Image (tube, grey):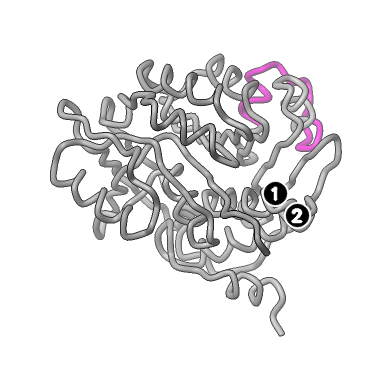
Amino acid sequence: QGRCIMKVTSFGEVLWDDFPDGKVLGGAPLNVLVRLRSLGVNGSIISRRGDDADGEELLRQIESKNVGTELLQTDTEHATSLVKVTLDAKGCASYEIVYPCAWDRIAAEEAALKRVRESDAFIYGSLSTRDEVSRASLDKLVEQARFKIFDVNLRPPHYNTDRLLEMMKKADLIKLNDDELYELSEKFGSPYHSLEQNIRFLSDLSGTAKMCVTLGRHGAIYYQDGLMYYHGGFHVKVADTVGSGDSFLAGLTYKLLNNAAPQEAVTFACALGALVASHHGATPEISLKQIESFMNPA
């Protein structure tokens, strides 16, 4: 094909998800990159870990997934992030996130600014802006980015709506789930009750032409330049939903960067998200071939 490998950089939390049966590497910005890496994208994470055993193991595991760690900083004062995860009967997770931890103190180093400038896309979430240190760094990095993707992850009480709107206004693409869409629309004074009207409301409010709303097992809606593209989802037996939204976003990003048609992008993203939900953990190994045959079984 002769085209150079795509580069995607993400900013934010890297952590251990502490499940009842053991610790698993996680953090949305990292999960998205691990999935993109499996699709052949060059991914690098801008984050911070503690100078501790958890941090050493974190570094080792990220490296083993072939995600670039050259921008993963080490903090001598704050511990590596450990998040307590509890699953309900349906496999839906809730999280207990300790504050402060190492990724609350990410610095905007010159190498990180350079990497963002060279990237095809820059992905950032809302969680990593709960502290002013990481927030100020993100503000500097976003200014360098070509294509800015804001992954809304509302984890109460770690967010502030004014700040969310500020970050939405900087984005070229916003991804959220239906609960988050309704919550934010209401907070920002939307008079509407339908999904579509609220997508348009948030798009107009933030001046962002591309929005994607995931609907759990019912698929997703992708909105681009005034048009809605729907996919009703794929039926799978759910193991747990951890990381399926992150893989969805990876699939969408991958297709959009490859100039796929919007409908193709949202269909592929839904398939990838569903496949991940059918496995345990955030980053099970899934090949492009598996995704294709899952979408179109012979």
- Choose between 159 and 222: the one closer to the eye: 222
Residue 27, picture quadrant: top left
Work out which quarter of the rendered image holds the C terminus and state it: bottom right
Is 97 placed left or right of 55 in the picture?
right
- Residue 295 percent coordinates (x, y): 69, 71
Label 1 element class: helix
Amino acid carrying label 2: it is Ala
Q: Is residue 58 visible?
A: yes
Query: How far from the left and from the top, in percent, is residue 159?
Result: 46, 23
Task: Please identify the residue farthest to the bottom as the structure is shown.
Answer: 298
192 magenta-colored: yes
Q: Is there CB contact under 8 Å for labels 2 and 1?
A: yes
Give, as a three-letter code, the residue at label 1.
Answer: Leu
Is 258 a magenta residue? no
Residue that mark 1 sits on: 256
The circle drawn on residue 260 is: 2
Q: Which residues are magenta?
A: 182-197
Kindly identify the residue that appears in the image at 48 percent across and 57 percent down. Answer: 37
Residue 181: image quadrant is top right
> Residue drawn 76% across and 37% down?
195
* Extreme-front residue of the structure: 2
